[in-house]
Image (cartoon, grey):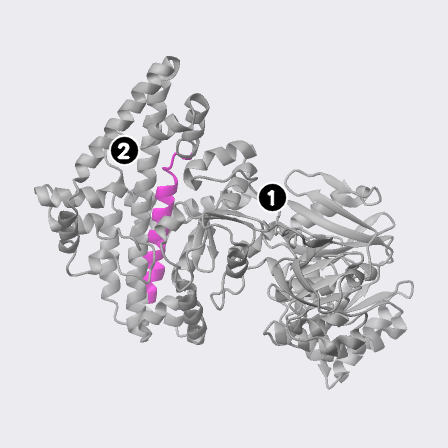
Amino acid sequence: MYIFDLKNADNKGNKTGGKAASLGEMLRMGLPVPHGYVITADAFENGSLKSAAAAELKDLVNKLPASHTWAVRSSAIGEDGNENSFAGAYDTILDVRKEDIEKAVLKVAASAENERVAVYAKERNTVTGGTAVVIQQYIKADLAGVLFTADPISGSRGKMTGSFVKGAGEKLVSGEGMDGEFVIDAVNYSFDGSGEMAPYAKKLYKYAKKLAADGIPKDIEWAVSGGHVYLLQSRPVTTLFRNSHEDFDINDSLCGELLLSKTNVGEIFLRPVSPVTSGMVDMISDVLGIPLISNVCGQLYLNISGICSMLMSFGVKKEKAFGMIKELAGGIPDTEVPVYPFDRNIVLKSVGNIIKNSFKKKDQKYHPKKIKGRFTELSFDLIGKIRKAESRSELLNIWNNDCEPFMTGVLSAITTGLDVKSLFGTRDRLEKICGTELADRLMSDCSGNGNIESLGPLLGIADIISGKMTREEYTVKYGHRDADEMELSMPFPYENANFPDNVIEEYKASGIDAYAMKAAQEKRREEAVNEFKAKYPSYSGKLDKMLKKYSDAVAGREIIRSDALRIFCIIREYLLRAGTLTGLGDDIFMLYTNEIKKLLAGDESCIKKIPVRRRNYEKQMKLPNFPSMICGRFTVEEWQASGSPGGYYRFGETTAQSGDNVISGVAGSAGQIEGTARVLKNIDDAASIEQGEILVVPAANIGWVRVFPKISALVTDVGAPLSHAVIVARELGIPAVVSCQSASAQIRTGDKIRVDGTLGKVFVV
């Protein structure tokens, strides 16, 4: 069988392609998608339909109502997917009568040979698969347009941006023009735009929100006909994705407009993380359902925007949510925290699963109540078991039956005991009473009458020297704590035969008295408490309670971190044993944990991924330390070109130089470049373009894409950020400014110009 109803299209797109898979998924979600069919890619052979497929198509056409016309569209394997869009590369034929469908199908299938398909595939370093074809009821549109569930330039998911034309949408996507633009607030619905669009905006917003609930920004084509809103297509915004999980070429800052901070996270991960560590951090975030950590070219950041968005989904006001995490985020510039719609059910479901999994019969041994307070003992038992594993299958069984249930139990136990309100809200409340300076001093010592876990390794050395603790006790208690303690490719201190004698000698040589330093800090805090009570006597009793709760919360968090590290010890021991049993050695750290499980089960396909991941990892290890805080998209090249200081980088902060002639347009594709202009009036003169020149044209449709590999930037007089050509420019990383009105008249070939695709400006220098 070669022809399927769209509702039954393969959701992986293996035979039906990305477009049909997306349409089928939308239909199954109950969204208003025009009815249609898909002819699978394997139905075609040597430019024609196989005889059986041709017979199926003839039967289908005979059953179609003559009252409708049809849209015949490509659905190539790999088109409209997470990695590549192939926007406008294949042909689409609209308003087709039923008797002309077969002819249109063959023409669309043949468009796989288009030059623009080959150029796109080459520049994106991808290959084209077969071409399936969609036959869909044609909607004669009163209005048609495109909606991005995230801003394609800044990546902001707090706003949905769209544009439309009257009639069919081809004029819009071809870049010929548009009749209106609009913006929808995605967090708290509001509409800003043309009155023509207003009656349909809220319904479109609801559909778009449903499509974007999976966390993947979407580019949605839609139409209004007879007062009804229809969805014609939905594809991922490929430019808002981490580059390649498979190759370990990851940059989460490109996924959306996010405020990211290295505070806490950057202090844990002092170096770029290995693939296995990155995958483990992702897995923990997924298990908790909280978008905690972002990876920017190997360097990890705390996702302030994600945490704020999550808190807001539970009814916390934005300002309060931001105040609650000030302690966690550290010093934050005076900037708006980007937020986005967040489905709180993700967190509720994840936490529920943690608790539910802990009660499964096979996990009773690792029930949270049974293992609480025994993490150290049980982790050493598991490590011993792992080290004795003699075969791949035995090691895999230990992982499935012991390690994973233990980790689930630990996560369940530690997540139920954290006082989030005291941990993240105390500083904000104190600042409102006494100001920042005194609040800082009040919170400078968090141990109360005891010692927080992070001080233990230092104070423990003093205890060994004074005879209060043995070397063996110290190794058991603190042998898993180190500067690289969460990097799985790095050894833990307990693996060193000279531990802890090596750190004892370092401590002695330093001349430090840890307990004296702690006592001095406690004294300063006591002085701050006395000062507060003298100035604000009415808050005296309340202060003691607040600081007690805060100290307990901090101590609890530190214990959680130490306990969580027991998980990393077990994982590292498992990886070391897997490396030995598979013969991969240290290359095991270039794989993700799910791949290692498959490897132990006999599937060795992941091994071929190791060389490219190691190259990317080693490249990341050579990069300089990135800014401690990032807002918006970040690339090393743009950061270095911006001259931004190391402390804070905000995407798009550039200014015109004195004396520049500035031409204003619309931001099409982000980036900044300076070079020589090549002004052309039509595609026939494209051969004159020199490598690296900036192309300036009245308009650029998809036909210009074949010259994109030669140019360093694009400037157009007319066009829109949502046209196919500009979509491709974004995917290729080519800065673009569109809708400049008269750039091709003001600029001459040979002029030196600077294109800022972030600000939407061109500077003639």
Query: Which residue is located at x 22 percent, y 56 percent?
Result: 493
Distance from Cα at disc 1 to Cα at disc 2 = 37 Å
Image side of residue 525 versus residue 348, left or right? left
Amino acid type at mark 1: Pro
Query: Do the residues bearing badges 1 and 2 touch, measured as CB atoms within 8 Å?
Result: no
Q: Work out which quarter of the rendered image holds the C terminus and state it.
A: bottom right
Judge whether 459 appears above or below 526 on screen: below
Image side of residue 455 versus residue 270, left or right? left
The residue at which mark 2 appears reads as 447
Quarter of the image where one finds residue 700? bottom right
In x, y percent, where is residue 86? Answer: 68, 69
Q: Nearer the viewer, mark 1 or mark 2?
A: 2
Amino acid type at mark 2: Ser
Is-magenta flag for residue 406? Answer: yes
Residue 11 appears in view: no
Query: Which residue is located at x 60 percent, y 55 percent?
Result: 216
The residue at which mark 1 appears reads as 341
Image side of residue 630 versus residue 70, left or right? left
Please state the extent of the stretch shown in magenta in the rendering.
Answer: 396-420
